[in-house]
Amino acid sequence: MTQAQHLNIGVLIYACGHHQAAWRMPHSSIERIGDITYYQSLARTAEQGLFDAIFFADNQSFPASSKSDMPAFWFDPLVNLAAISQVTQHVGLVATISSTFSNPFTAARQLLSLDHMSQGRA
C-alpha cells in the first residue's frame, strides 16, 4: 500500500514585487508598502487560497543606490507576522531571523511570543 504524501505550499510576500522593477508597473501597490492592512489583506487572500504558510525574509541592508531603484522599506518580519496573526486563523507564519544581528535569547523570545499569539502557527 502506498503512503499518502502531503505537499506544503507557502507564499513569500514581498510588497514591492519580486522583480527589481515590479514596483514601477502601473497597477503595483507601491503606495501601500508601509500600510500593515495591505499585508493583512494579502495574508487573508493566501489563507482563503489554502496556502499552508506565509513567509517573510528579514533583510539587513537597504540596497537602493538611487531614487529610481526599488523602494527600500520592510516591516520587521516578526512584527508583520504578529499583525497578520490577528486577522488570520489557519495559515502558518514563517520568518527568518538574523543569527548575526539578533541575540539568541531575544530571537527565541520573539518567536515564542509569535507562536503563542498565533495559537501555534509560528
Image: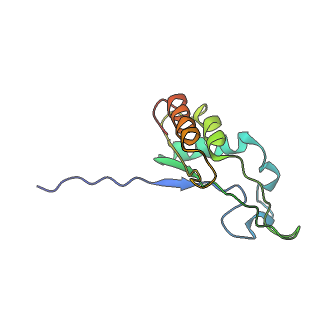
Residue drawn 76% across and 61% down? 62
Query: Is residue 116 or residue 38 the one in the foreground?
Result: 116
Query: Is residue 56 or residue 101 the one in the foreground?
Result: 101
Residue drawn 73% across and 61% down? 61
Q: Of all residues shown, which one is farthest toward the right?
A: 67
Q: Position of residue 2 (x, y in %)?
A: 15, 56
Q: Does residue 120 appear left or right of residue 2 in this picture?
A: right
Query: Is residue 108 or residue 26 the one in the foreground?
Result: 108
Q: Does residue 80 appear left or right of residue 31 in this picture?
A: left
Q: In the figure, residue 21 lies in which quadrant?
A: bottom right
Q: Position of residue 97 (x, y in %)?
A: 58, 50
Q: Position of residue 27 (x, y in %)?
A: 77, 60
Question: Relative to 85, is 34 above or below?
Answer: below
Which quadrant, please, contains the N terminus? bottom left
Q: Position of residue 107 (x, y in %)?
A: 56, 42
Question: Relative to 18, is 9 above or below?
Answer: above
Figure label count: 0
Residue drawn 65% across and 35% down? 83
Q: In the figure, residue 22 lies in which quadrant?
A: bottom right
Q: Of all residues shown, which one is farthest toward the left?
A: 1
Residue drawn 77% across and 63% down? 23
Chosen colour scheme: rainbow
